[in-house]
Image: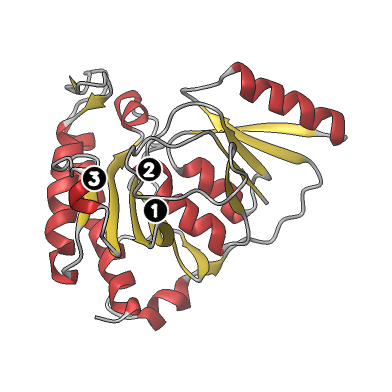
Amino acid sequence: MTREDWLIQIINAALRGGEEILEVYNSVPTGVGIAVEYKDDKSPLTEADKRAHIAIVNALKETELPILSEEGKKMDYSERKNWKQFWMVDPLDGTKEFIKRNGEFTVNIALIEGGKATMGVIYVPVTKDLYFADKLAYKIEGFDKPTVSINNLLGRADQLPLSQTRTNYVVVGSRSHMSEETEAFINAQKEKHSEVDILSKGSSLKLCMVAEGAADAYPRFAPTMEWDTAAGQAIANASGAKVINWDTKELMEYNKENLLNSWFLVER
């Protein structure tokens, strides 16, 4: 398969995952809580996470690349350390947002090559917004049908970053997390810029906001895992933004022995 084939494959896989998520999301009556389990690390898990994982893994089998998914079998480092290429999958990023029913959750799939996130897809099931990247980054609004042609895909897409007319400096943050260090970063920007605004978003949409140019920076000074950021990093990098490890000041790397990310800053 070519890289174009891979890109088509992960876009369609993300779409399938999104369909499974929406079936669960829409099957729960308004005012009724979504059933939640809790994993060993106390993070929430729903039926939608499981169903999306199965759909995505089945859709990616044809690529014959290994898959590391948040909801899959936890691969020992000795098994995955020599992988040259593999898929990093978060079947439902923003489970807390899913439970809150605010629509700000995503399907994330990234290609990891030599420890770098080089290709990525982020799909937003509720709005049907699709972000994708391989060398260049794009966005399509209202994407809801499988595609077989790159030309058809690009004919509908807007290249990122999108044209912006704003003059304010925008910091994107989380609806679920706001640390003291993040507040300090925001205060520092207020000393540099005449107007600083905060844009609140859930899940990997925060990286997408910087990628498309709706925000200038996303500081994350709180825990995340590799599958939370890999697809977003591929898209942000391809749009001309950078996802920088706060400790090393280098681009974030993937497939580490410990899959916990360091603090990081996404900045345009």
- Residue position for label 2: 226
Residue 145 in view of the camera: no
Q: Which residue is more in the foreground, 242 or 53? A: 242
Location of residue 105 in the rendering, given as x and y in whole percent from the top left corner: 37, 39
Picture layout, residue 109 above or below residue 217: below
- Tell me the amino acid under the disc marked 1: Ile
Instruction: Give the x, y percent position of residue 208.
Output: 52, 49
Name the mark on residue 122: 1
- Left or right: 187 in relation to 124: right
Residue 91 on image: x %, y %: 25, 45
Q: For the N terminus, which image quadrant?
A: bottom left
Kindly identify which numbered label has been placed on residue 77: 3
Instruction: Say whether disc 2 or disc 1 marks the residue closer to the N-terminus.
Output: 1
Give above or below for 166 relative to 130: above
State how the image is colored. Answer: secondary structure
Residue at the image point whose x is 48% and y is 43% from the top = 205
**Is disc 1 placed on a helix, strand or loop?**
strand
Q: Is residue 121 visible?
A: yes
Residue located at (54% from left, 68% from top): 158
- Earlier-in-chain disc, 3 versus 1: 3
Nearer the observer: mark 3 or 2; the answer is: 3
Give the secondary structure at mark 3. helix
Q: Amino acid at mark 3?
A: Tyr
